[in-house]
Amino acid sequence: MSNQFSLKGKVALITGAAYGIGFAIASALANAGAQIVFNDRHKESLEKGLDSYRKAGIDAKGFVCDVTDETGVNEMVAQIEKQVGIIDILVNNAGIIKRIPMTEMSAADFRQVVDIDLTGPFIVSKAVIPGMINKGHGKIINLCSMMSELGRETVSAYAASKGGLKMLTRNICSEYGKYNIQCNGLGPGYIATPQTVPLRERQPDGSRHPFDSFIIAKTPAARWGSPEDLQGPVVFLASDASNFVNGHILYVDGGILAYIGKQP
Ligand code: NAP
Ligand code: GCO
């Protein structure tokens, strides 16, 4: 049974994994035996990420690459296949959010979020699928979100992107399942990373951020998630243990989607 969760001999590409959720996911896949490759759009972040992996005892390979740059992504994948091997596992993790009321958001800002959070996973998945087909297997894991299911004020572009990513996940499942490629989503709840600092930093008077209190009340576990909470679920989705799981969004949210919220 334990061998089903082994990733020994597998090559895993995690996008945007210099820090945050991507780094935690890459660390878990490495601990399960995978060879880690990651990218970041900035050389400075990449170097810091490589240093973090070294300190964690992980021999990761890094590439400067923006997931919205199709030519750059194709070149990166070709380099990985030449230097490391065909990619067995792709985690589409790279993503941004812009919290702006929709009527105040420019079309350019909206397009940038969609380009990174939805078109990026399309571009990278399109680049790695041919190798997976040739190899006879593959795992694609897309970082979805509570916003794949729910809306909230100020995150129109992000919710539209993450809702689209849920359906891109199901479409890759539908189109490439016959090649033994499984494409699933990982849907974190509210996780303490740089992306959510603005939602939970202490107020000037030292009190909790209102959104922090809101999320605590909306989560049965009554806490924010940590990137480490995602490590077991992602190893499951990346391993042979999930070979008949396809097109599924695995929510790791402490129960938020099941809960009406704590009575005030
Ligand atoms: P984060 O701390 O902001 O990290 C995002 C990563 O993506 C950074 O390494 C960033 O690199 C990289 N990135 C951004 N745009 C890129 C691009 N165009 N090309 C390549 N890399 C790019 O975010 P996070 O909290 O770890 O979230 C990671 C993923 O999980 C995202 O898809 C996010 O939507 C999703 N998610 C997060 C939460 C949460 O509560 N934190 C919950 C659900 C889903 P730079 O240094 O270049 O910015
Ligand atoms: C927000 C948060 C969320 C989380 C995550 C929840 O502003 O609501 O950033 O979007 O990042 O996506 O699953």
Image: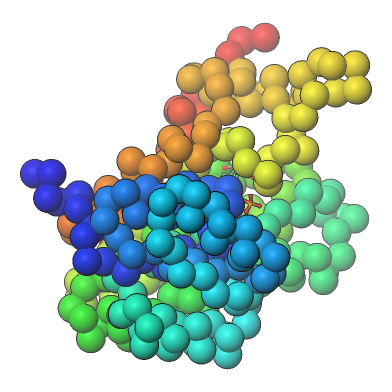
**Residue found 78% across the figure and 49% down from its top:** 99
Considering depth in this image, is 201 or 10 the residue closer to the camera?
10
**Residue found 43% across the figure and 35% down from its top:** 229
Task: Tell me: 92 left or right of 198.
Answer: left
Task: Tell me: 171 left or right of 64.
Answer: left
With respect to residue 113, does 249 lie above or below?
above
Residue 198's spot in the image, x, y percent? 77, 38
With respect to residue 169, does 67 lie above or below?
below
**Residue found 46% across the figure and 28% down from its top:** 254
Residue 205's spot in the image, x, y percent? 90, 16
Considering depth in this image, is 165 or 6 the residue closer to the camera?
6
With respect to residue 67, does 4 lie above or below?
above
Residue 182's spot in the image, x, y percent? 28, 64
The image quadrant of residue 80 is bottom left
Colouring used for the render: rainbow
Considering depth in this image, is 133 or 78 the residue closer to the camera?
78
Considering depth in this image, is 14 or 36 the residue closer to the camera?
36
Q: Is residue 114 visible to us here?
A: no
The image quadrant of residue 37 is bottom left
How many numbered marks have been drawn onto this rendered protein structure? Answer: 0
Q: Quadrant of the C terminus?
A: top right
Q: Residue reaching furthest top?
A: 264
With respect to residue 128, does 199 lie above or below?
above
Q: Quadrant of the N terminus?
A: top left
Rendered-image quarter of ligand 2: top right
Q: Is residue 17 visible to us here?
A: yes
**Residue found 80% across the figure and 65% down from its top:** 109
Residue 38's spot in the image, x, y percent? 49, 66
